């Protein structure tokens, strides 16, 4: 009887060990492949930023953007100080000092509010932004001709 009890105990211990080993394997197998789906980036636009030419106004504006790859959305919140009411914002693709393709218009009506605006965007653009945020900038401009205003590159 004692021998049967020892064998049962040994068998139970072995099953526990195998179960924990399998669990550890499953954890290591999947935990390293986890990819976040939301990323947060920041940019501060100032007149001493990367603006081409002479800025037409001074002031500053900050944007916090969250990109959601699963829902294909670009959500943002802007703040500003000393920004003309008729200024228009844009997020564009371009490296420091270079203008690029305009991608997402930003409403300056939201300055100072706690309102978060979300817009849909293509997965390829969002993934490119995630991979190289410094290739995108936030700019405020004046007038129909998009006269140079203030600008800042995105960063994590």
Image (cartoon, rainbow, N blue to C red):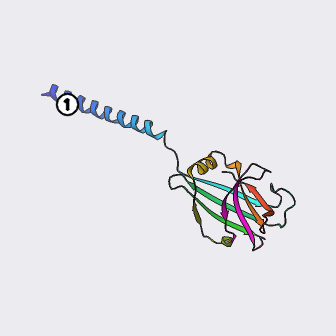
Q: Are there few (<14), some (14-19), or many (20+) residues within 10 Å of tag 1?
A: few
Pick the front one: 127 or 5: 127
* Residue 88 part of the magenta segment: yes
* Residue at 49%, 43% in the rendered image: 34
* Residue at 20%, 27% in the rendered image: 7
Report x, y in % for residue 25. Answer: 40, 34
Please state the extent of the stretch shown in magenta in the rendering.
82-108
Q: Quadrant of residue 104?
A: bottom right
How many discs mark residues in the rendered view? 1
Question: Left or right: 62 with respect to 66?
Answer: right
- Quadrant location of the N terminus? top left
Report x, y in % for residue 30. Answer: 44, 39
* Residue at 59%, 66% in the rendered image: 117
* Residue 93 part of the magenta segment: yes
Residue beneath disc 1: 8
Pick the front one: 141 or 1: 141
* Residue at 31%, 32% in the rendered image: 18
The answer to whether residue 88 is above or below residue 71 is: below
Residue farthest along the bottom direction in this orientation:
85
């Amino acid at each position: 009887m004692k021998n049967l009890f020892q064998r049962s105990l040994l068998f139970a211990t072995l099953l526990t060990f195998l179960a924990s080993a399998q669990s550890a394997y499953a954890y290591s197998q999947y935990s390293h492949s986890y990819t976040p789906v939301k990323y947060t980036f920041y940019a501060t636009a100032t007149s001493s930023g990367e603006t081409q030419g002479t800025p037409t106004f001074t002031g500053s504006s900050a944007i916090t953007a969250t990109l959601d790859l699963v829902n294909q959305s670009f959500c943002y919140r802007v703040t500003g100080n000393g920004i003309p009411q008729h200024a228009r914002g844009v997020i564009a693709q371009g490296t420091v000092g270079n203008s690029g393709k305009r991608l997402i218009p930003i409403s300056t009506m939201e300055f100072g509010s706690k309102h978060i605006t979300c817009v849909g965007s293509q997965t390829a653009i969002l993934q490119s932004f995630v991979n190289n945020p410094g290739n995108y900038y936030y700019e405020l401009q004046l007038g129909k001709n998009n006269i140079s205003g203030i600008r800042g590159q995105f960063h994590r």
